[in-house]
Amino acid sequence: MAKYIAKRLVYMVFVFFIMSILMFGIYKMVPGDPARLLLEGSKAGMKPEVYEMQYQQARERLGLDKPIPVQYAVWITNMLKGDFGYSSNYRKDVIDVVAQPLSNTMQLNLVAIVVVFAITIPLGIICAVKKRSTFDNVVQVFSVVGYSLPTFIIALVLICLLAVKAPIFPVSGVNSVGFTGSALAKAFDKLWHMALPVLVMVLGSIGSITRYVRAAMIESLSMDYIRTARAKGVRERAVIYSHAFRNALLPIVTIVTGWIMSVFSGSVIIENIFLWPGIGKILFDGLMQQDFMVVLAMQMFYVIIALLGNLIMDIAYCMVDPRVKLD
Amino acid sequence: MSKENKAKKSRVSILGLLFGNRKKQLSFLEEEQLQSPMRTVIKNFVANKVAMVSLIIFLIIFLSVLIYPAVNHIDLTYQEQTQQNVAPGFNMMKVPKKLQGNIKEISVGSTFSVGVSNDGEVFVWGKTKITSVIDVKDIPENMGKVVQVAAGADHVLALNDQGELFAWGNSRNKQCAIPENLKTVKNIKRIYSGFQCSAAVTEDGNVYFWGNTGIIDFKIGEYQGQIDKIAINSQGVLGLTKDGQVVSLTANELAFSRIPEEMGKAVDIALTAQTGAAVTEDGKVYVWGNKTKTIHEGETLEGVVSIEGGRYHYTAMLANGDVVAWGHDDFGQSSVPSKVNKANVTTVYTGYYQNYAITDSGKAITWGLKGYILGTDNYGRDVLSRIMHGGRMTMTIGAIAIIISVTIGIIIGGVSGYFGGKVDMILMRIAEIVYALPFLPFAMTLSAIIGNKINETQRIALIMVILGLLSWPGDARLVRAQVLAERNKEFVTAARAVGVRQKGIIFRHIIPNVVSVIIVSATLGFASAMLTESGLSFLGFGVREPRPTWGNMLNGCQSSTVILQYWWRWVFPSIALGLSTISINLIGDGLRDAVDPKANER
């Protein structure tokens, strides 16, 4: 196990460097000169020779006067030291720009994940146990609808029903404007603002995850050991929850880890519609404002998350199913 | 044979014709022996009701988005400010029954019309809702006997037999605020409403103008006191003096303010959006301004008595009572129905895209724009046409993206599965990374960075490639697993023994055996490619305006005004997109069950 993880880590470092070269290459394809962009604001009041001097200084400061491989080396060293660059839009270090939105995104997604799994796992199990019943068929139909509809359509419908026609939930923001009250009241206010985005996320992912759980459960319910368990008189509840479900966990873990990885990437569409100041919104704004240092840092962050996610998935396999051997 | 059996048999044979089943029904055992696997798959699929219904729905959508754009071309630059956010429906020219046969006068507004009966009662019909609170259908009470009405883009003027003036509708630009000095004037001859402005001409030749002076810079100068009639459009005002001279009544130069000099004495004038026209004493028509191919056709006419202008067309009455129309015909506004010239027409009222010909019995014959089946968007573009063209775009992008991804998937999966070992390890690690990358953020970044430098067609190609390049790992894994299962079977060993090259073994012997699985995965992938494209376009990183796709049609629809008041702008594209993806997914599920009936048991 330890050997496997070590091997994986070496491989991850390797992939990380390849991806970073790729990302840096894409970043270098960006049209426009960051040094000129930096001076854009103060250009008007400057004499041409002063501007030229400042421009050269800015180029030097940003390291643009060096050849591209050197630029890459400088950039990657800074990245590894924890310096992710400087955001031209926010005029702050990228790390400061990203910190708060990341926490916002994680809060939103954690609530959504808890709700989704609280619903989908029991639902999937019930559907698998009552396979081909009316209940199962109805859930199947809704799950197809759920995963076929894009999130923005679900969001529009929900905004229409729950925010415009019947103004129950707020459409945007994290907290009410000028909210004052105790910390607890503030937390509730935040949850109230989360309601619509979370509902959209839940409706959008409930369909596919229920299907996965159902398929995994049906698979393991058809195994011989289930028949054995039933034959020796184990209670049906125990058969389902301790014999069948534990064996169905393996495919479920795959989805769970995949999903948890997406917690960090956030949902660009949902955060945009509901103006939730999360990481997806930052990426969107960064791309819109041509603030590519932020985008670059975020993409590298995604790569790390993706690599870690794969590793965690493998380890999780071992933990839920001792039969899985890693080598 | 019972009736039921007969019906069953005929149904089977129709489906058989459609899907190439054998005419002769075989017993189960015969079938097993004789039917090719593909035929079994089709048979299983046809038996699946849900999948078949979905297939039919999808085919209907697919054929519509294929045929409609081929027949009706889209003008991407088209915008029409007078037709913004028009609700769905066809009642724009539905003259009320009570008015029919008793018409004194009709005035045409942008999306509605106003009529007054011989008894002085006012009627409004068409798309009368201007905003959530303003409806031009709310006619003021106690107007007395109305003798004249004038409908503008979003407001109405009325004049009663006492010479009193009334205005209602949208008054944001003060177009309903009747000037104080006009309230005492009792000799109003004619009232006019235009785009956010109103005007009145008195018997003694004075013109009063009010409303949005930011759009129309009204300036009458020396002609005050000489004007007989005027014509208003969304940019300017033309006047006709009592001695037959046509003059521009705006301070600024417009396309139609340079009036031809050699015209002679004019008797009637009219305006379209970009041109002016006049009828002279000797019955000839002159048109000037930004003339298009069709708009000056009227210059060949003779014996013209009067002329009326729409948004992009003219109608004229001839001395012999005939009505002719020319100009743009995109809503049939220049196609005068034959029954107009059979009837005894006394007057023609034209405005925007609608025409009313009034017969001597007081009835109206109409032609032109009835309405939009699915409404219009915020630029006045027909939602139906955009859904159809957008659907073609969305489906094309989805299809090509999936072809790219399946091709890469087959190659990588095939090679990886067949060779195994190091090649497999490397390829699958790459697949793993691509698979783990957050799809939408990466696609957005690539589209934003590369897409800035290229034109729109290249952008669309780029989006297809991005979608294809980011979605192959699923297919590759699937193919690899199938190849792994197939590669040790006898026929592969046989092929190898005969000396078939490795490339041939993978792509000619193994891949055909996994093709059904690939088709299923491609079908499901098609739906998700469409969804991703829509998501990208919705965010503004896919296909951009004015080129429609189902995604970017929904862009800008999340404000509560649009959601509630202009519901047709988001409901119809959503239905089109949702119905397509749901039906494709159901077809995919059906195909999977048909290919692998055991999957159904699971």
Image (spheres, coloured by chain):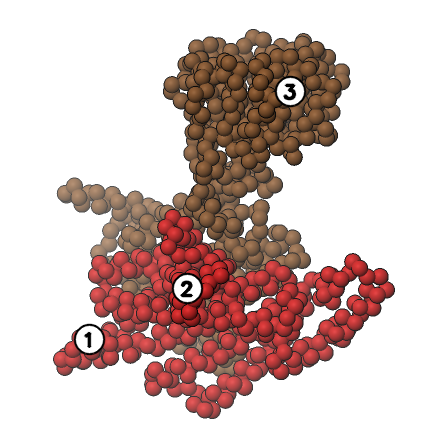
Chain colours: A red, B brown
Report the residue at 55% width, 58% height from top: B464
Judged left or right of residue A229, residue A101 is right
> From the viewer's perspective, is residue A283 above or below residue B292?
below
Callouts 2 and 1 on one subunit = yes
Report the residue at 27% width, 57% height from top: A138
Q: Which mark is residue B207?
A: 3
Q: Chain of mark 3?
A: B
Residue bearing the label numbered 2:
A189
Q: Secondary structure at mark 1?
A: helix
Frontmost of labels 3 and 1 is 3
Q: CA distance from mark 2 to mark 1?
A: 39 Å
- Check disc 3 and give the amino acid type: Val
Asked if labels 1 and 3 touch by Cβ distance under 8 angstroms, the answer is no
- Check disc 1 and give the amino acid type: Arg
Q: Chain of mark 2?
A: A
Percent of width and height locating residue A257: 42, 75
Residue bearing the label numbered 1:
A237
Percent of width and height locating residue B484: 41, 75
In this view of the protein, which residue sits in the foreground, A319 or B589? A319
Report the residue at 47% width, 46% height from top: B562
